[in-house]
Image (cartoon, helix red, strand yellow):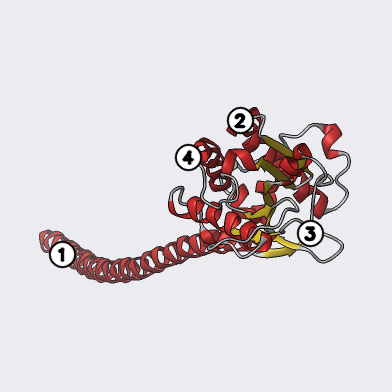
Amino acid sequence: MLKKIFAVIFIASLLGSCVSKKKYLELEQNLTDTKGQLQKTTIEKEDLEAKFAVISKRVEEYNSKINSLRQETSVLKEENDKKMEVVDADGTVMSKEMRSRLNSTLSKLSPEELAGAQTLKDSLNLAIAYKLNKSIKESNLNDDSDINVNIDKTVVMITVADSLLFRTASYRVSPKAASFLQKLADVINSEPSMDVMVEGHTDSRSIHTEKIDDNWDLSVKRATSIVRILQNKYKVDPARLIPSGRSSYVPLASNDNRKNRARNRRTNIIIMPNINKFFALLADEEVVKL
């Protein structure tokens, strides 16, 4: 009986020992599997990190390209604003930027003044007339009795008596003309889109001296004398100046008495728009749409 008990205990002990070893092997296998899975996960993580770095670099490159494209778009828009576009039925063209500047000038006019502007040319004329009137008023040119200023739409006619500018039968400019010429130069220099014609006129009495051939010669030399002073002393762009002589053939009155002859001896300063230069006149205006 005792032998049987020992035999049972021995067998139970042997079975218990076998179970523990089996569990150990299972745990060892689990550990191996876990290490393998961890290594695999680590490799996958590193692979994902590498892919993320590539994607991040591409995103950065795309963002850089987008910013560059935005800058190019801004430049192109600015250039496009300066491109010419048809703005009138007759095919007249001007840039969007210049159109805005024109609108800015027109915004200073009253509704009554604007009512008559049906075309682009009408609008240009209104803008030019506004600028000319403003410059003439600020110059006080019309304060002298020997000077008459007449503004007809876009053309300013300044008529100056002979007695203010020249000595009798001479084309040398009188010193007392300096104040007038300074004011005139200020107006001309403030309006870069204007051309200026200086037009000499005489009365009908003939003249011939050592230096003057005839009335034609005197009228041209007087105009040229004024032009030279405007250029050399007052820095007016000579490309804008046009000297001309009319002799005695465009009188204001008949030459039958001293008073009328004095009226006919005159110099006309004609300030007129040059459309090719007109937009320079608007360049200093604040851009405000109507």
Marks 2 and 4, the one that precedes in the sequence:
2
Question: Which amino acid, mark 4?
Answer: Pro
Number of other residues with Cα within 10 Å of mark 3, as a class: few under 14, some 14 to 19, many 20 or more: some
Vertical placement of residue 272 versus 141, above or below:
below
Q: Secondary structure at mark 3?
A: loop
Q: Which residue is mark 3?
A: 87
Instruction: Nearest to the eye among marks 2 and 4: give it.
Output: 4
Q: Residue 176: percent from the left, percent from the top? A: 51, 36
Question: Which amino acid, mark 2?
Answer: Asn
Spatial distance from mark 1 to mark 4, Cα to Cα? 136 Å
Relative placement, left or right, of 47 versus 162 is left
Relative placement, left or right, of 25 versus 262 is left
Vertical placement of residue 117 versus 146, above or below:
below
Q: Secondary structure at mark 2?
A: loop
Q: Residue 95: percent from the left, percent from the top? A: 67, 59
Q: Which residue is mark 4?
A: 175
Q: Secondary structure at mark 4?
A: helix
Q: Which residue is mark 2?
A: 140
Name which quarter of the figure residue 34 lies in.
bottom left
Marks 3 and 1, the one that precedes in the sequence:
1
Question: Which amino acid, mark 1?
Answer: Ser
Q: Which residue is mark 1?
A: 17
Spatial distance from mark 2 to mark 4, Cα to Cα? 19 Å
Q: Residue at x 15, y 64 (%)?
A: 17
